């Protein structure tokens, strides 16, 4: 798939930002659509089924986090790439955005070249995953299916956010192996994404709670490993 076949939706209530992002992404060959608020973003997403959505967090009607949560709750958008635009630089806002299932975030004021670079990097990561291929993991009563994006504990299906799923799959793919914190960040979030140390901790805690299994061990000062 070349860039011309990839559809991007940008949602922001500032016309100048929409225009400059649209111009730069179109220059890269992407097909770009725009929306000026959260409700329009949801409507446009349903119409065009974009490969990537760029959401401003502070939008009228529905903010970017609300839009992301709604999209991620629908199977159609489980694998859709999502980037947040935010003028909020504190760690709690970053965690909230990533926790809803966003793949990356970019701070305002926006550097068009940086944003374009992040977009290209996300698409490259997806391509590599598709080329590498993945398989179903079956570990005792735990089944992790990366194609259907399903986790089963016994006969119970467990719903995980996108990054929670990717983190669990990474750890479970090599039971007993200790993954360093930096290694986890690079493989799950990508080295282009800068996230705080608490990001992994929050995701690990939620995975444990949702699975109801004591299957992820913290190796203090080092990282995490999967043991079941």
Image (cartoon, rainbow, N blue to C red):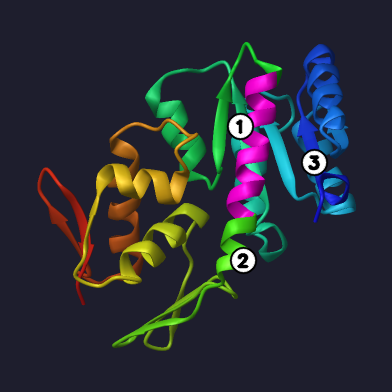
Q: Point out residue 37 in the picture as x, y percentages from the top left corner.
A: 79, 29
Badge number at residue 131: 2
Provide the residue designation for mark 3: 8
The residue at the point 29 percent across, 70 percent down is: 174
Is the C-beta separation of discs 2 and 1 under 8 Å? no
Measure the C-alpha gap from mark 1 to mark 3: 13 Å
Q: Quadrant of residue 152?
A: bottom left
Q: Which residues are magenta?
A: 113-126
* Drawn side of residue 186 relative to residue 77, left or right: left
* Drawn side of residue 180 relative to residue 117, left or right: left
Of the two numbered discs 2 and 1 in the rendering, the one whose residue sits closer to the viewer: 2
Badge number at residue 84: 1
Q: Is residue 124 magenta?
A: yes
Secondary-structure class at tag 1: strand
Secondary-structure class at tag 3: strand
Q: Can residue 202 be seen here?
A: no
Measure the C-alpha gap from mark 2 to mark 1: 27 Å
* N-terminal-most mark, 1 or 3: 3
């Amino acid at each position: 798939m070349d860039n011309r076949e990839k559809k991007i939706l940008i949602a922001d209530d500032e016309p100048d930002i929409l225009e400059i992002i649209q111009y730069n992404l179109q220059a890269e060959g992407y097909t770009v659509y725009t929306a000026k608020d959260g409700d329009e973003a949801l409507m446009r997403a349903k119409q065009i089924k974009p490969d990537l959505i760029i959401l401003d967090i502070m939008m009228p009607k529905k903010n970017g986090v609300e839009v992301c949560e709604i999209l991620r709750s629908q199977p159609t958008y489980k694998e859709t790439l999502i980037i947040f635009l935010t003028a909020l630089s504190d760690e709690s806002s970053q965690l909230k955005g990533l926790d809803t299932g966003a793949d990356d975030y970019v701070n305002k004021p926006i550097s068009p070249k940086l944003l374009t670079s992040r977009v290209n990097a996300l698409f490259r990561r997806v391509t590599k995953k598709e080329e590498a291929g993945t398989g179903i993991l079956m570990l005792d009563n735990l089944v992790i299916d990366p194609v259907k994006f399903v986790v089963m504990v016994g006969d119970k299906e467990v719903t995980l956010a996108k990054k929670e799923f990717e983190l669990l799959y990474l750890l479970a793919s090599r039971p007993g192996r200790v993954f360093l914190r930096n290694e986890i960040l690079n493989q799950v979030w990508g080295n282009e994404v800068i996230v705080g140390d608490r990001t992994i901790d929050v995701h690990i805690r939620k995975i444990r709670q949702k699975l109801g299994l004591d299957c992820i061990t913290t190796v203090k000062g080092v990282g995490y490993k999967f043991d079941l």
